[in-house]
Image: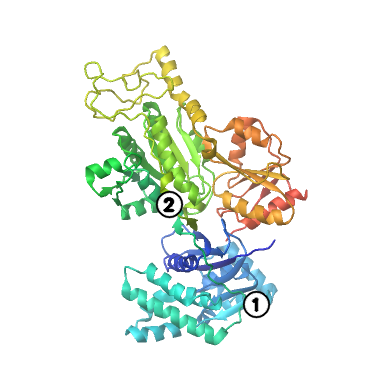
């Protein structure tokens, strides 16, 4: 397996600027024309616990993270102990020599089993349990260690700005670690300084102090270690215009462009970041061009050049979903965002929306469960729940995106599906996508088309005595929908079964008609939604291995497929995106001639593969799963598929890598 990329990692105490440093590193790489993929890992703790960020860069397209670290940048002792042994031979560790005497047993946030494993490794090698001991062990494994006296350099920076407080100056430790990393890589210093200025653009003085810190780190590294690290990183010329985005904010941007004007939420990781982004960007620049197509044309006419999205933090998730349903009843594109525990509370509200044929979008950020589970870790364990949450039968569409580009366009589609079929749509965005950063080609806003379905604008003149048959039977099961309050359109909403006006009734004939009307929408959606929006198929038509998967494993699978092709192993990949209604016939067709079907999922039971069996009766030969809260890497998938091809793998492979 040959990698043509570079993986940089930084870690530190949560709240100490780890995210900021990773953003600076990634932005500097992206500005130099490099492709970037970033993975963020953190504990369910506001401050104090360990967090780390991996940034993978390459001149070629990359879609996932890898496990082998090329350079570890640190500014405190815990990161050294936790990650020093993940660095490959000929890789690098940057550290503060003031940390040398710090001892493993003095770090209270390291778990007992991790401490025991490290202590055993050090003891077997005859080394002390100090930072200098773990670094010596890394050296013996071929890792280059670079001490950088941060405090000494920071004092020099502070002197130029009249700042003598060491605690203030130490806020720049993270940026100095980034600068030292890039200096070792001989990367363009000006690109790093520009990235720092963008990161701190709202604080010009802070920005310039950090820029000075970048220069000090470059000068020190060039004088002390010039040319000693053989890996070099150079900018790559490109004419492609790219975005650098994070998953949560990608969903948020898509919602605003899709015409969503009410977002409700109750704080929960990792969903809250999306709503907080919307709160920070609640005022929307409206574009009135191409009025016949533009989803914002009506707003432009009514409001001029400015629009707004209302973002409401409710008292709980029950209120969040019912408030969003209220927005849908009023004719406003509405959504709510949550994660597993919050989604549990939304089940009855989903049933109400299903019974009353109300369009509402729920963005479900899947994380580790059950119960509170792993609040800030990854899992694809909510698929079955998304498919069946709520009592009784009612239609809902379930859509799962596989990368950030899909996240954007699928968010728009979720609103279109919801209004076209007047039903809840659950859009699953797993935590690995929510907290991933990536460079993308510029998104094509011409692909943002709005379909509001059978939305009726008042006043209504064909009602009887002002009453309107909101739930009138229609050939496609979808009735015209005037918003609540439309003049001439009085009708009723209730959680009970009802007739065409919405009046409660338990008549068995009416019950049959209404149930068949509602559930029939899934058959309509199954016929109407284009197959290219429901699944993707990658690779040759016939292959040694056929992978079936969904969600964020997409990028790692595609990256691994490239390596396997170099080994002469052909792999194709069926990614299922619209899971309800399931694309049964097309899946049967694609898998009918498969030699060896392998399911890859981030949950214990293989939930999608179970749905696949139920819908198609197709057996799956092998299952690769991971459920320790860390995403699958392309290296893990490569190793698994290669062992399967060689006939050396068990029927069920459990992946366990992760820190």
Q: Residues within 10 Å of mark 2 (few under 14, many from 20)?
A: many
Q: How many marks?
A: 2
- Evaluate whether residue 263 shows in this view: yes
Q: Quadrant of residue 153?
A: bottom left
Rendered image coloring scheme: rainbow
Q: Quadrant of the C terminus?
A: bottom right
Q: Residue at x 24, y 42 (%)?
A: 301
- Evaluate whether residue 436 shows in this view: no
The mark that comes first in sequence, 2 or 1, is 1
Q: Is residue 70 left or right of residue 503?
A: right
Q: Nearer the viewer, residue 615 or 456?
A: 456
Dot 2 lies on which element?
Answer: helix
Q: Residue furthest right?
A: 647
| Position above or below: 512 against 287 | above
Q: Position of residue 131 (x, y in %)?
A: 57, 77
Mark 2 and mark 1: Cα distance apart in space: 41 Å
Q: Position of residue 648 (x, y in %)?
A: 77, 50
Q: Which residue is mark 2?
A: 250
Q: Is residue 489 left or right of residue 514?
A: left
Q: Is residue 504 left or right of residue 525?
A: left
Q: Residues within 10 Å of mark 1 (few under 14, many from 20)?
A: some
Q: Which residue is mark 1?
A: 139
Q: Nearer the viewer, residue 201 or 349?
A: 201
Q: Position of residue 89 (x, y in %)?
A: 67, 72
């Amino acid at each position: 397996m040959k990698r043509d990329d570079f993986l940089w990692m930084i870690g530190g105490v949560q709240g100490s600027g780890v995210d900021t440093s990773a953003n600076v590193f990634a932005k500097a790489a992206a500005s130099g024309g490099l492709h970037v993929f970033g993975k963020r890992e953190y504990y369910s703790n506001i401050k104090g616990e360990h967090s780390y960020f991996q940034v993978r860069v390459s001149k070629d397209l990359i879609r996932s993270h890898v496990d082998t670290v090329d350079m570890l940048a640190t500014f405190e002792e815990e990161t050294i102990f936790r990650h020093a042994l993940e660095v490959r031979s000929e890789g690098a560790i940057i550290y503060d020599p003031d940390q040398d005497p710090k001892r493993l047993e003095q770090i209270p946030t390291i778990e007992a089993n991790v401490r025991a494993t490290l202590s055993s490794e050090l003891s077997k090698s005859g080394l002390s349990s100090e930072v200098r001991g773990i670094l010596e062990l890394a050296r013996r494994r071929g890792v280059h260690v670079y001490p950088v006296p941060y405090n000494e350099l920071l004092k020099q920076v502070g002197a130029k700005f009249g700042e003598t407080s060491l605690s203030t100056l130490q806020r720049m430790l993270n940026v100095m670690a980034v600068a030292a990393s890039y200096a070792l890589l001989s990367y363009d210093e000006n690109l790093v300084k520009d990235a720092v200025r963008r990161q701190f653009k709202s604080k010009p003085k802070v920005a310039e102090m950090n820029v000075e810190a970048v220069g000090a780190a470059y000068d020190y590294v060039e004088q002390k270690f010039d040319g000693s690290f053989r890996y070099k990183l150079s900018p790559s010329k490109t004419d492609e215009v790219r975005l650098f985005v994070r998953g949560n904010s990608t969903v948020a941007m898509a919602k605003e462009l899709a015409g969503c004007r009410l977002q409700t939420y109750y704080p929960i990781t990792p969903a809250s970041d999306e709503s907080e982004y919307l709160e920070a960007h609640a005022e929307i620049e409206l574009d009135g061009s191409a009025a016949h197509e533009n989803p914002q044309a009506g707003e432009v006419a009514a409001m001029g050049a400015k629009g707004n999205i209302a973002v409401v933090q409710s008292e709980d998730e029950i209120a969040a979903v019912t408030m969003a349903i209220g927005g849908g009843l009023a004719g406003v594109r509405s959504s709510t965002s949550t994660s597993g525990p919050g989604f549990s509370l939304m089940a009855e509200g989903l049933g109400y929306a299903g019974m009353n044929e109300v369009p509402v979008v729920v963005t479900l950020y899947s994380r580790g469960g059950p119960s509170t589970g792993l609040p800030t870790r990854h899992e694809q364990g909510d698929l079955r729940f998304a498919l069946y949450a709520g009592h009784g039968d009612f239609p809902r569409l379930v859509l799962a995106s596989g990368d950030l580009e899909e996240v954007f366009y699928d968010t728009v589609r979720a609103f279109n599906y919801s209004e076209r079929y007047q039903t809840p749509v659950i859009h699953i965005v797993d935590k690995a996508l929510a907290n991933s950063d990536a460079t993308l080609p510029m998104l094509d806003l011409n692909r943002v088309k709005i379909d509001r379905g059978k939305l009726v604008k008042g006043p209504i003149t064909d009602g009887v005595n002002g009453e309107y048959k909101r739930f009138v039977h229609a050939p496609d099961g979808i009735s015209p929908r005037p918003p609540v309050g439309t003049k001439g359109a009085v009708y009723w909403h209730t959680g009970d079964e009802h007739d065409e006006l919405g009046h409660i009734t338990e008549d068995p004939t009416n019950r049959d008609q209404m149930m068949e009307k509602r559930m029939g929408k899934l058959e309509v959606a199954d016929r109407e939604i284009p197959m290219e929006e429901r699944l993707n198929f990658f690779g040759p038509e016939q292959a040694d291995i056929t992978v079936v998967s969904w969600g964020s494993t997409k990028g790692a699978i595609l990256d691994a497929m490239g390596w396997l092709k170099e080994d002469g192993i052909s792999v194709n990949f069926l990614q299922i995106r619209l899971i309800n209604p399931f694309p049964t016939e097309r899946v049967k067709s694609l898998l009918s001639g498969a030699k060896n079907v392998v399911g890859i999922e981030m949950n214990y039971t293989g939930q999608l593969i179970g749905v696949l069996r139920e819908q198609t009766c197709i057996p799956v030969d092998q299952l690769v799963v991971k459920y320790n809260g860390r995403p699958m890497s392309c290296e893990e998938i490569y190793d698994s598929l290669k062992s399967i091809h060689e006939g050396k793998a068990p029927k069920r492979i459990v992946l366990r890598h992760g820190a």
